[in-house]
Image: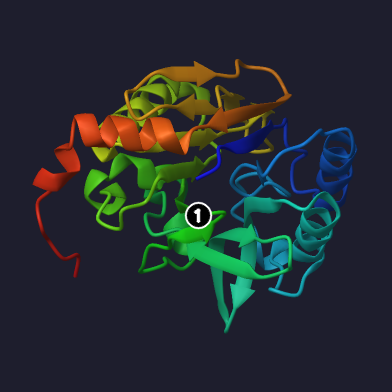
């Protein structure tokens, strides 16, 4: 199995301004050299807004069209979370767009009640595993990271990733939980966060990054940045074979 190059975009998101954000990302991606997957944060066109009534898009909206255009032109998968209305419900929805235009989706399951997300969005009820170039990815969103039963590697995924708008007051939790999720699930773990201050006055310290299955972390710091990481399938399998803790997983069902 080939290694993969994963590019994380860590922006200072322009508050509730999809056009400005897409223009910013386009300029960064235009200069990007070879990669396989480009990942953006949670609600990457708007910031973590509780105004879905004015910001929601459909599955045929401009932001998804932009993701498909980038995926096709760069021959990559493009991943990120958007405010999406689908069948009269609004979701914080992660989208995985393949180079051929195919789209896989995951709707955030754990809504952040302390930020009133549950009053403005509907919760998803199932995990998604995306297969790309032989790798299995489990995309999740922000607050989901705090619930290890939901994160548990019962699907034999190789990479778990968290798109987030994770604020600075709990920044230590962000870095600690990313490492924990990598170790306990014996997978690569990717965290994709934002920087700057949003329209609600919340500040963000970034530190997107990649954590190996052994818990070795490389974080990106606090400024706007784009960085590419390489993950090795051989190293993942060698570690799992030498220390096969997943064979002792508990069996359970989430009702």
Is 16 on the left or on the right of 219, as rendered? Answer: right
- Decide which of 79, 2 is in the foreground and name it: 2
Q: Quadrant of the C terminus?
A: bottom left
Vertical relation: 2 (above or below) 71: above
Circle 1 sits on which residue? 134
- Side (left or right) of 119 relative to 157: right
Q: Position of residue 168 (x, y in %)?
A: 51, 22
- x and y percentages locating residue 252 in the rendered image: 12, 61
Q: Secondary structure at mark 1?
A: loop
Above or below 36: residue 225: above
Q: Residue at x 45, y 22 (%)?
A: 171
Total numbered labels placed on residues in the image? 1
Residue located farthest toward the bottom when viewing the structure as drawn:
87
- Please tell me how crowded label 1 is: few (under 14), some (14-19), or many (20+) other residues with Cα within 10 Å: few
User: Residue 55: which quarter of the image?
Assistant: bottom right
Residue 244 in the image: state x and y as whole percent. 17, 37
Q: How is the image coloured?
A: rainbow
> What x and y, as percent, mark residue 210?
50, 28
Q: Residue at x 49, y 60 (%)?
A: 130
Foreground of the two, 183 or 49: 183
Q: In the figure, 99 relative to 190: above or below?
A: below
Quarter of image, res 64: bottom right
Quick one: 175 or 77, which is closer to the camera?
77
Residue drawn at point x = 78 percent, y = 38 percent: 14
Q: Is residue 154 something one can see in this rendering? A: yes
Looking at the image, residue 115 lies above or below residue 134: above
Q: Is residue 202 among what the camera can see?
A: no
Q: Quadrant of residue 101?
A: bottom right
């Amino acid at each position: 199995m080939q290694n993969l190059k994963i590019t994380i975009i860590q922006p200072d998101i322009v508050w509730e301004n999809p056009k400005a954000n897409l223009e910013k990302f386009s300029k960064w991606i235009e200069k990007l050299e070879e990669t396989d997957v480009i990942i953006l944060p949670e609600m990457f066109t708007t910031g973590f807004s509780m105004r879905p009534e004015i910001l929601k898009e459909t599955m045929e909206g401009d932001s998804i069209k932009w993701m498909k255009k980038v995926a096709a032109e760069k021959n990559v998968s493009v991943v990120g979370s958007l405010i999406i209305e689908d069948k009269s419900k609004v979701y914080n929805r992660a989208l995985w767009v393949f180079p051929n235009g195919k789209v896989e989706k995951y709707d955030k399951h754990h809504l952040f009640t302390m930020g009133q997300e549950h009053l403005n969005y509907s919760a998803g009820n199932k995990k998604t595993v995306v297969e790309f170039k032989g790798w299995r990815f489990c995309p999740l969103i922000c607050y989901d990271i705090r619930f290890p039963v939901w994160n548990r590697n019962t699907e034999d995924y190789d990479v778990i990733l968290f798109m987030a708008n994770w604020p600075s007051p709990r920044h230590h939790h962000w870095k600690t939980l990313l490492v924990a999720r990598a170790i306990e699930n014996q997978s690569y773990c990717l965290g994709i966060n934002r920087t700057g201050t949003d329209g609600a006055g919340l500040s963000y310290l970034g530190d997107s990054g990649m954590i190996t299955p052994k818990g070795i972390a490389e974080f990106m710091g606090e400024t706007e940045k784009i960085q590419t990481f390489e993950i090795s399938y051989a190293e993942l399998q060698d570690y799992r074979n030498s220390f096969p803790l997943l064979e002792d997983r508990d069996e359970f069902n989430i009702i």
